[in-house]
Amino acid sequence: MSNTPAFPAASLLGYPRIGRRRELKKAVESFWAGRIDEAALDAAAKEIQLGTARRLVELGLTDAAAVPGTFSYYDQVLDAITHLGAEPARFGALRNAAGELDLNAYFTLARGSAEVQPLEMTKWFDTNYHYLVPEIGPETNFAATSNRIVEQFEYALANGVETRPYLVGPVTFLLLSKASDDAPAGFNPLSRLEDVLPVYAELLSRLAAAGATWIQLDEPALVADQDIPTAELQAAVARSYSVLAADGERPAILVSTPFGALTELLPTLAQAPIEALHIDAFKGALPSPAELALLAGKTVVAGVVDGHNIWRNDLAASAARLDVLKAAGLNVTVSTSTSTQHVPHDAAEEAQLPAELRSWLAFADQKATEVVTLAAYLGDPASSASAIAEATAVIASRAAAAGVKRPEVRARLAALTTADFNRSAYAVREAAQEQALHLPPLPTTTIGSFPQTSEIRSARARANKGAITGEEYSQLMKDEIKRVVELQEELDFDVLVHGEPERNDMVQYFAENLEGFDVTVHGWVQSYGSRCTRPSILWGDVTREKAITVEWAEFAQSLTQKPMKGMLTGPVTILAWSFVRDDQPLGDTANQVALALRDEIADLEAAGIKIIQVDEPALRELLPLRRADQPAYLDWSVNSFRLATAGAGDGTQIHTHLCYSEFGVIIDAIDGLDADVTSIEAARSRMEVVNDLETHGFGRGVGPGVYDIHSPRIPGQAEVTELLGTAVQHVPARQLWVNPDCGLKTRGYAETEESLRNLVAATKEVRAQLV
Ligand SMILES: CN1c2c(nc(N)[nH]c2=O)NC[C@@H]1CNc1ccc(C(=O)N[C@@H](CCC(=O)N[C@@H](CCC(=O)N[C@@H](CCC(=O)O)C(=O)O)C(=O)O)C(=O)O)cc1
Ligand SMILES: N[C@@H](CCS)C(=O)O
Ligand SMILES: [Zn+2]
């Protein structure tokens, strides 16, 4: 390219795309249900994109290419798959008459069909966002098979806003891919780099022709330790950006690197002929002076505003960081450390929050204002002096506010001893539990939630609005629990659950019932596809004023002679799925939550509950991206779970549950939780995890999931029998439990009942073969 256009002085790396009132969720789900057609969905999507563009311009992102073109119908990795034409062969003929992967094909990849399982879903770095995993093999035939990125750019431009199109970069795309089923053993998707680069080049050239001046290629995988040698990674990065930045018609290239420091790859990107490099300048130390010197001649897009948490920026500290970059003689602009897709739209919408708490918060819109303020600071420090002083005062008010530090909580933590983290030896517990529970071999259970029907959600919505009383709501939930218990009795499950109808979300529900948290009304964040959560705000010391789950568990137990599982969410998951205070180590906050859960467990035991499950699906999610940081994390996270559960008596069976990640790498930590029974997602990977369990010599109860609950597909009895057959080859049968992969809240009753019936029938078949 000839003349490099200026990179916008202030920009965001990405923006929420679900819509301020979850308009995208509603439109997409209506489309799937056949209530609206593609044209109506397209119109809703355009309205969201234009709304975003106009809002960000209004907030001061006025330079060309300042507004990120990060809209997606479902997922940014799925967008890359369709743009590269990299759909797996197992989906058969997906392309339309024009040879393109249209919206129907796109959603089939995401959601599967009666015949074919969808793409696997896993965590996006250390966030609660899930992407779809590309499957790449030697035969994958890459070609530009969707023009949506160009059409979206053209639409915004025609409406007066030049956006900055976004694509997951080639190295990250291939590093996040797994080898397709038909690939030979040891196949590495990165070996296909030379074949994807021409498609990226083609898309860049089409964007340039449409008038795009900048493109953002997102390379977060470069801040995480990978399983391939650094030199190989450096070569892949160098090769990619020398090809993509070669002469020819293309937009100027910004490579973004959210979620941490680039370390060994910084020099590689510094030497690449790209025009701008984004660095995460919020997390950790800034690059050294020697590293900064390498960046001369490029625009450095400094991500000084945290895109991943919601605390108001310490503008004075950010200004000091920007000063360091400027003093190194660099051409600096201001942005966020990550996309703001991980935070809600606008804190100003949360009028119900205490005003003081609200003043501490910055959601995506407030972050836009912060980057604009800091960009103005770079131009003229005096212009932002009052905004900086105000931010400093707000941060001071947070430190001094009532409830942020509670002496009684701190005293209890300070008095803990090693004994508080340890239970009796497993053999002792196993014998006591055997006597208390008398379970058959291969006990059957479910993970906790049953379908959250629209009746349940609407009852809760009516109770929140005051249209029904608290008593009426409770009665409706009890009716639901009774139905769920009767269903499980009829299906002949061994260990029952109450179904969690009273919970809006497995974290928010606890946050609403603990001190130290607040919750939002409109603070939705996309978790995957159309599914959203409202992460709670953990701002103060945590206490439990009264029992939370006991009444429901006791009621459910009163309906059956079989053991009813008490159901709690573990401390690590409560932290991972909330916005957590940043003024003390996470481990200290986790232990505060653990003590509240420990008290809840004691109350459940006193109410006669003999099995208590403490879910930790997010244990893997918070694992640091750099290996050097992982032992310290695993230490505090495992200890917080142990603190929560170690008060339980020997005869109380503690279960835990893990899902939505690959767990092989943390199998030691899972063992370290010392739970009596661990249920773990396994069906979609066809029991891969049992190999890890066997190699590790996992010695306690374990339930590898045999029913993939992420899909409406019903597993047949033979399929479950086969999965159980695989499991018993690797895990001693006396340790084995039978359960689905995860809770059933996102499923409908029709498919749930049939699947669970098959699960129990398969278990009986395998049991019969055991004796
Ligand atoms: C298990 N997972 C979870 C994760 N994170 C969590 N915080 N929670 C999880 O369960 N991460 C990993 C996995 C996968 N991720 C998800 C995330 C979200 C869902 C999900 O089902 N989300 C629901 C919303 C759940 C909720 O908060 N429900 C509320 C509000 C419901 C609502 O929208 N009400 C309507 C009114 C309805 C009516 O009148 O009928 C409204 O407010 O407009 C509730 O139940 O009260 C979603 O739909 O996105 C699953 C897995
Ligand atoms: N008990 C929860 C765990 C989800 S990870 C549920 O069943 O929905
Ligand atoms: Zn789960």
Image: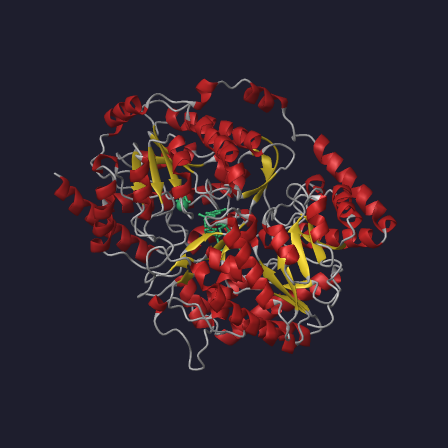
The image's colouring method is secondary structure
Task: Name the foreground residue: 132 vs 549.
Answer: 132
> What residue appears at the point 67 percent right and 77 percent down from the top-left corner?
158
Examine the image and state in which quarter residue 104 appears: bottom left
Q: In x, y percent, where is residue 461?
A: 51, 51
- Splitting the image into four quadrants, where does ligand 2 fall? top left
Q: Is residue 393 visible to the viewer in this orientation of the structure?
A: yes
Q: Is residue 14 visible to the viewer in this orientation of the structure?
A: no
Q: In x, y percent, where is residue 256?
A: 62, 56
Q: In the figure, is residue 554 to the left or right of 494?
A: right
**Residue projecting furthest to the right:** 382
Q: In the figure, is residue 669 to the left or right of 314?
A: left
> What residue appears at the point 38 percent right and 61 percent down from the top-left corner?
118
Total labels drawn: 0
Position of 109 relative to 388 (above/below): below
Which part of the image, by quadrant, shows the C terminus? top left
Q: In the figure, is residue 622 to the left or right of 257?
A: left
Position of 98 relative to 458 (above/below): below
Which part of the image, by quadrant, shows the N terminus? bottom right
Task: Name the foreground residue: 325 vs 57.
Answer: 325
Position of 663 relative to 79 (above/below): above
> What residue appears at the point 72 percent right and 50 percent down from the top-left corner?
293
Q: In x, y percent, where is residue 420?
A: 46, 21
Task: Name the foreground residue: 490 vs 771.
Answer: 771
Q: In x, y percent, where is residue 417?
A: 49, 18
